């Protein structure tokens, strides 16, 4: 089965799904048969930004039956990083600190409407900002440049937390390098969504593959056990996502929601034991702010007392506090992150807010839903 849409690029991209894995053709047929038998509308949320990229880039929504809807969820850590962190780092970059940031947070806007709004603009205006690939890069720079004071902007979910946890645990972070911890934990936000947004009805969840490689597939068993929602831990090939949809449909038809680990080639039930031990030793879960979404219990990872000597907030005595414009006027990113709106529902999408000049945080990172849709518009339906 091949759905043909106008445009050579679209046809070629969807053909590539089937050329990439011959099983895809059969799986799509099975999805249509199962969906016809199910009858009702089925809403499936993919948690990870990379899953959303796979779905959008390969046009998987065009292959879905009319009653199967794939919804993007809160899988972009940059999108939910509080803007007041950016404001703080911008100010420090013009003082005595060299700010180290991942590339996908480089253009993340802060809360200010005028003046310097991002680390990218700070760098262009003379601020000391450096793009790094990893915390290891920051360690190397700090060891080489001992006369400079450095700050690493630690953005991410559980996937990136071991990169700072292991050096902190080994006490190998030099005194001239501080860390601004913006880490967020993923299962709590899914619980928050299910318990506080009844308007977002979910029939199934595709759990994040990268995160699950650290925390384990079993971290998501609460979805079927507590909320009666089928969940599939999926890989990132198009056929992985198609299989996840098929498995969720089968579970709905059987009325037996459970946890399925489709990504067994990478994800173990218990996860990465050594990485989890390092995270648990160094960090503690506390209530944390998610940009324009609000405070979520036990959703932030902050260093325990014995490791706060390298924590920027603790060393400088900074109180974490949302800015007045965490929700930028007109931006619907909070709704997009929680699956309550599509990027095309936002009046600023591809008008005032573009990949070249992002206004809202969902247009910044390669894992942001708005950025993904903007770069794959011919395949979005």
Image (tube, grey):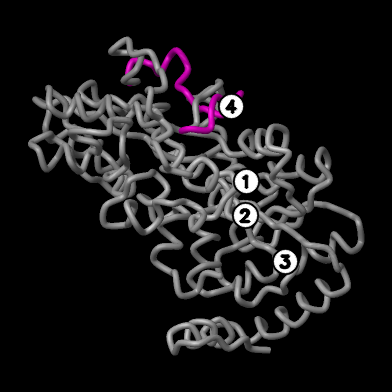
Does residue 305 belong to the magenta stretch?
yes
Q: Residues within 10 Å of mark 3 (few under 14, many from 20)?
A: many
Tell me, for residue 267, which label it has, or none: 2
Q: Which residue is mark 1?
A: 271
Q: Which residue is mark 3?
A: 68
Residue closest to the far top:
317
Decide which of tag 2 and tag 4 comes sooner along the chain.
2
Q: Which residue is mark 4?
A: 296
Q: Residues within 10 Å of mark 2 (few under 14, many from 20)?
A: many
Q: Position of residue 287 (x, y in %)?
A: 56, 21
Q: On the rendered image, what quadrant is the C terminus found in?
A: bottom right
- Image-based side of 293 in relation to 201, left or right: left
Q: CA distance from mark 2 to mark 1?
A: 6 Å
Q: Residue at x 76, y 43 (%)?
A: 223
Decide which of tag 3 and tag 2 comes sooner along the chain.
3
Q: Position of residue 21 (x, y in %)?
A: 59, 83
Q: Relative to residue 377, is residue 99 depicted above or below?
A: above
Decide which of tag 4 and tag 1 comes sooner along the chain.
1
Decide which of tag 1 and tag 3 comes sooner along the chain.
3
Q: Position of residue 130 (x, y in %)?
A: 18, 41
Q: What is the span of residues highlighted in magenta in the rendered image? A: 291-310
């Amino acid at each position: 089965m091949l759905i043909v849409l106008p445009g050579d690029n679209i046809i070629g991209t969807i053909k590539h799904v089937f050329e990439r894995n011959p099983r895809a053709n059969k799986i799509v047929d099975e999805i249509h048969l199962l969906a016809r038998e199910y009858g009702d509308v089925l809403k499936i949320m993919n948690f990870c930004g990379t899953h959303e990229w796979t779905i959008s880039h390969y046009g998987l929504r065009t292959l879905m039956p009319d009653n199967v809807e794939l919804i993007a969820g809160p899988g972009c850590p940059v999108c939910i990083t509080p803007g007041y962190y950016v404001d703080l780092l911008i100010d420090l970059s013009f003082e005595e600190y060299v700010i180290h940031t991942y590339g996908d947070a480089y253009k993340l806007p802060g809360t200010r409407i005028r003046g310097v709004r991002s680390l990218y603009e700070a760098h262009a205006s003379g601020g000391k900002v450096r793009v790094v690939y990893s915390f290891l890069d920051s360690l190397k720079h700090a060891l080489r440049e001992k006369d400079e004071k450095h700050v690493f902007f630690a953005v991410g979910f559980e996937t990136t937390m071991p990169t700072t946890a292991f050096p902190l645990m080994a006490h190998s972070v030099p005194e001239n390098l501080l860390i601004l911890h913006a880490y967020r934990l993923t299962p709590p936000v899914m619980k928050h969504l299910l318990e506080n947004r009844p308007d977002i009805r979910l029939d199934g969840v595709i759990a994040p593959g990268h995160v699950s490689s650290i925390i384990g597939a079993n971290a998501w068993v609460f979805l079927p056990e507590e909320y009666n929602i089928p969940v599939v831990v999926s890989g990132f090939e198009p056929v992985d996502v198609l299989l996840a949809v098929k498995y969720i449909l089968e579970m709905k038809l059987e009325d037996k929601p459970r946890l399925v680990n489709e990504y067994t080639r990478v994800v173990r039930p218990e996860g990465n034991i050594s990485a989890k031990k390092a995270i648990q030793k160094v960090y503690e879960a506390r209530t944390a702010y998610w940009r324009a979404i609000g405070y979520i219990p036990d959703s932030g990872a902050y260093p325990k007392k014995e490791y706060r000597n390298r924590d920027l907030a603790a060393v400088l005595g900074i109180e974490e506090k949302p800015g007045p414009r965490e929700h930028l006027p007109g931006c619907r990113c909070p709704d997009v992150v929680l699956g309550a709106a599509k990027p095309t529902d936002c009046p600023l999408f591809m008008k005032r807010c573009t990949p070249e000049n992002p206004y809202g945080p969902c247009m910044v990172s390669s894992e942001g839903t708005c950025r993904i849709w903007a770069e794959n518009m011919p395949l979005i339906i």
